Amino acid sequence: MEPLKIKYIHLDHCRGLSLRQKMHILQFDPQLEKLYRMPREALRTLLRMNRNAFDTFYNDLHHLELKPYLALYKKKGIRATAAFEPEYPALLKETYEPPIVLYSMGDISLLKRRCLAVVGSRKSGTYAEKVVDRLFPDLIEKNFVIVSGLAKGADTIAHRAAMKFGGKTIAVLGSGFFHIYPRGNTVLAEKIKQNHLLLSEYPPFTRPQKWHFPERNRIISGISEGVVVIQAERRSGSLITADFALQEGREVFSIPGNVLDSLSEGTNHLIQQGAKLVANSSDILEELRI
């Protein structure tokens, strides 16, 4: 493994840093040649960190031994891809604040294929199942990879339907691989790992935190050409994914729903705001010029 990649992974494993601070370091020192030699207070001034967070980071920077982690990741089939490597998703690299390292388990070649994100409410059920049963056969026939976030409800429905119809799926996690969340989807994650792809910006030992899930939504949209929102309440995380998609110049598609159903408030609002109303797969394929 080349030295710069090792430095990227090492920096990514240092606790106390936000993604923005990691990127600030790389803007200041792209080859990470100065970082490990910088005086303590000069580095703290550069990063504008509070004392406790900085002490944690600085200790890891100079004392965290990466070799045992890399050996374990190799044994478990975990790949780390640095942002400068050709395997890093080109679409994601174009986005605002892309992860400096992506961790993956499974078929990384799926990131080279055309991807479509499908997201929705954790409360989604029968209606979402009927929608994906209607949309997915044609999308999968056109070789789209279905991307979602492994959450309960719509995400789970999307992953399972992709597999049911013989397609491929990518699950983007809000945690490290050793802490699958929700735990109820551990078996599903194992199936995805075997024949599809698990993806995370978080090192494998990272436990899920509530702020991880809005953060991971930018990756769901970032690796995809468009985002389909199936069901969403007015204050849904799925709308965050749609917002990221708009910021990243991706297409946003929305499934209309019953105006009396709270799970349709978010999707109907998206349509009012200009999202493409989707009634069948051709509405998506035409917009993506297939």
Image: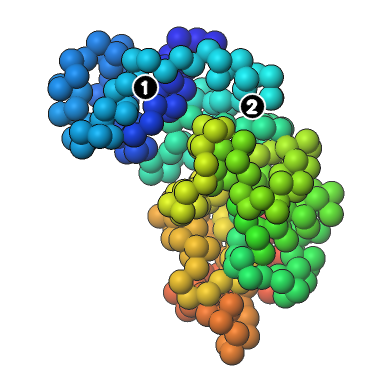
Kind of element beneath mark 2:
loop
Q: Is residue 258 left or right of residue 84?
A: right
**Count of residue discs:** 2
Amino acid beneath label 2: Ile
> On the image, numbered disc 1 is attached to which residue?
60
Q: Between disc 1 and disc 2, whose residue precedes? A: 1
User: Residue shown at 52%/41% (left/top)?
Assistant: 207
Residue 101 location, x and y as percent? 48, 30
User: Residue shown at 80%/50% (left/top)?
Assistant: 163
Q: Is residue 104 left or right of residue 83?
A: right
Residue 199 in the image: above or below residue 88 = below
> On the image, numbered disc 2 is attached to which residue?
78
Residue 21 location, x and y as percent? 30, 34
Residue 158 location, x and y as percent? 71, 58
Which of these two is toward me, 170 or 139?
170
Mark 1: few/some/many CA within 10 Å (<14, 14-19, 20+): some
Amino acid beneath label 1: Asp
Is residue 115 among the parts visible in the rendering? no
Residue 286 location, x and y as percent? 65, 61
Residue 99 in the image: above or below residue 268 = above
Which of these two is toward me, 249 or 14?
14
Q: Quadrant of the N terminus?
A: top right
Q: Is residue 114 left or right of residue 133?
A: left
User: Residue shown at 62%/56% (left/top)?
Assistant: 151
Which of these two is toward me, 84 or 182?
182
Kind of element beneath mark 1:
helix
User: Residue shown at 68%/74% (left/top)?
Assistant: 279
- Which of the two marks, 1 or 2, is nearer to us in this view? 1
Which of these two is toward me, 163 or 145?
163
Give the quadrant of residue 68.
Answer: top right
